[in-house]
Amino acid sequence: MQLTAEPGTQARPTGRRDTDGMAVASFVLGLIGLLVLNVFLGPVAIALASLALWRGTARRGRALLGLGLGIADLVVLGALIAADGTLSWSIAG
């Protein structure tokens, strides 16, 4: 864990806060990826969740949900590609 401090302020641990942010970001990106841009947001959610878990985040549940949602993004993309035959898809058909 790394401590940072500016003159006149107290040092705070930044490592844990960064990993917690990555866990939450993976969850949010995975959730948004179910609706739009799942080809991009799914892998990003998987990478952020994996990195947060590897670094030992306190928000392990969020990181696992982000990992699961990232994988679900890619599964949904695969199903839509199989049904439509193209990499792009729309709800309107």
Image (cartoon, grey):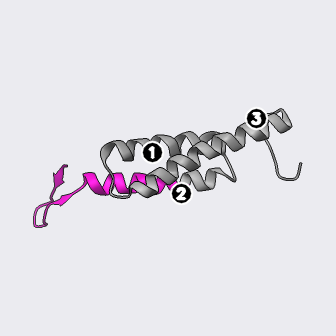
Left or right: where 13 falls relative to 64: left
Left or right: where 17 falls relative to 69: left
Residue at 39% x, 54% y is 60
> Residue 34: horizontal and vertical position, in percent?
66, 51
Residue bearing mark 3: 87
The amino acid beneath tag 3 is: Leu
Q: Give the range drawn in magenta.
A: 1-28
Residue at 78% x, 41% y is 80
Q: Which mark is residue 48?
A: 1
Residue bearing mark 2: 28
> Residue 92: horizontal and vertical position, in percent?
88, 53
State which quadrant residue 6 falls in: bottom left
Depicted 24 relative to depicted 47: above or below: below
* Cα separation between marks 1 and 2: 11 Å
Asked whether the beta carbons under mark 1 and mark 3 sit within 8 Å of each other, the answer is no
State which quadrant residue 51 falls in: top left
> Residue 28: horizontal and vertical position, in percent?
53, 57
Q: Which of marks 1 and 2 is nearer the N terminus?
A: 2
* Cα separation between marks 1 and 3: 24 Å
Q: Dot 3: few (<14), some (14–19), or many (≥20) neighbours within 10 Å?
A: few
